[in-house]
């Protein structure tokens, strides 16, 4: 497995493969890999070669303390990727990616104003900018992202559409622990009590899904799911949002279209998110 530390080395490596007619799949990550990431790597393996980027992107962190607290374990990540047969890892320093006088950023304007975009100002600008840079440096044929970060995936698909980026975006369903907790590098920072409480998020999504199938308004669903989570005293609920699954627009009245239920809650210092698309019975019946 090739370890690429500079933009130039990454460009040269990617170009050499292209010249041999080999397709390239990119898995962008911030490291501390878990089984969820390895599913992304498996999906990227549909291409002839796979490159994984490991880069904790400062531009997408609001607070310096969040960035400093982000876990890192490069040696372990390299071992996992080597064992998975990945062809190359791109693991640059911050100064390699961001020029000290960077002026240009990328923003999906509308999607940046809703939900996580409104909550974490500048977050999606950071994500779009770093993904654009990775696409420009490596020029992959496809790039793979987890559906767990639902809004992020929608933001990236929108950016690629709007800017005519020649990259196929592949979404991979959330990988869960046996108790339902969505896998995330953040789970490592949970203490024992918070770890035991955190599966309340996936249980709330299960509950929400059955309520959508029964027939419910978006407002009532948000209230019921919030109530479900706050019955767990350890969970500090930040948001429950029920939105149109395709546009993230608000849904008025009885839910008649597929919706995404998006959750964010703090367990101690750790912010966890989860999501599920729920389909109302009339839509399901329509496809029978
Ligand atoms: O989802 C992540 O890990 C990050 O937001 C990403 C896509 C690697 C961009 O830094």
Image: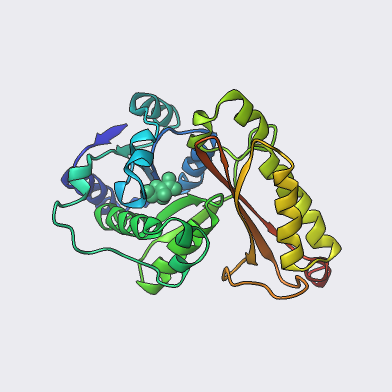
Tell how many labels.
Answer: 0
User: Where does the image place residue 43, in percent across and percent down from the top left?
Assistant: 51, 46
Which residue is depicted at the point 64% across and 33% down?
177
- Which quadrant does the C terminus fall into? bottom right
Left or right: 104, with 211 as reference point? left
| Residue nearest the viewer, comparing 82 with 185 | 185
State the scheme by which the image is colored.
rainbow
Q: Is residue 26 visible?
A: no
Using the rendered view, name the quadrant where residue 73 is placed.
top left
User: Where does the image place residue 139, in percent across and percent down from the top left?
Assistant: 30, 56
Q: Is residue 125 visible?
A: yes
User: Where does the image place residue 210, in percent across and percent down from the top left?
Assistant: 81, 55
Farthest residue to the bottom: give it. 252
* Above or below: residue 100 compared with residue 191: below
User: Where does the image place residue 262, in percent across and percent down from the top left?
Assistant: 61, 56
Which residue is depicted at the point 45% across and 72% down?
110
| Residue nearest the viewer, comparing 201 with 131 | 201
Left or right: 253, with 163 as reference point? right
- Which quadrant does the N terminus fall into? top left
Using the rendered view, name the quadrant where residue 231 is placed.
top right
* Above or below: residue 120 compared with residue 184: below
* Above or below: residue 189 compared with residue 184: above
| Residue nearest the viewer, comparing 67 with 45 | 67
Which residue is depicted at the point 77% across and 68% down?
217
| Residue nearest the viewer, comparing 54 with 209 | 209
Left or right: 96, with 29 as reference point? left
């Amino acid at each position: 497995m090739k370890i690429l530390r500079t933009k130039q080395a990454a460009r040269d490596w990617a170009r050499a493969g292209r010249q041999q007619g080999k397709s390239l799949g990119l898995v962008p990550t911030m490291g501390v890999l878990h089984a969820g990431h390895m599913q992304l790597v498996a999906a990227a393996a549909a291409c002839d070669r796979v490159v994984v980027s490991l880069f904790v992107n400062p531009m997408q962190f609001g607070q310096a303390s969040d960035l400093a607290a982000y876990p890192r374990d490069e040696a372990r990540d390299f071992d996992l990727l080597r064992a998975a047969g990945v062809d190359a890892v791109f693991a640059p320093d911050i100064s390699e990616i961001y020029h000290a006088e960077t002026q240009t950023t990328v923003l999906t304007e509308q999607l940046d104003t809703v939900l996580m975009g409104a909550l974490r100002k500048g977050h999606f600008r950071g994500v779009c900018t770093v993904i654009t840079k990775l696409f420009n440096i490596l020029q992959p044929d496809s790039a793979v992202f987890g559906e767990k970060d639902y809004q992020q995936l929608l933001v990236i698909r929108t950016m690629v559409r709007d800017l005519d980026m020649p990259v196929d975006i592949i979404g991979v369903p959330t990988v869960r622990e046996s108790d339902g907790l969505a896998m995330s590098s953040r789970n490592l920072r949970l203490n024992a009590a918070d770890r035991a409480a955190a599966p309340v998020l996936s249980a709330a999504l299960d509950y929400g899904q059955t309520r959508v199938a029964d027939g419910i308004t978006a407002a009532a669903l948000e209230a019921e799911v919030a109530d479900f989570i706050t019955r767990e005293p350890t969970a500090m609920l930040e948001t429950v949002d029920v939105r149109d699954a395709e546009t993230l627009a608000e849904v008025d009245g009885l839910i008649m279209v597929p919706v995404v239920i998006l959750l964010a809650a703090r367990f101690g210092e750790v912010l966890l998110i989860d999501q599920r698309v729920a389909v109302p019975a009339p839509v399901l019946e329509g496809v029978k």
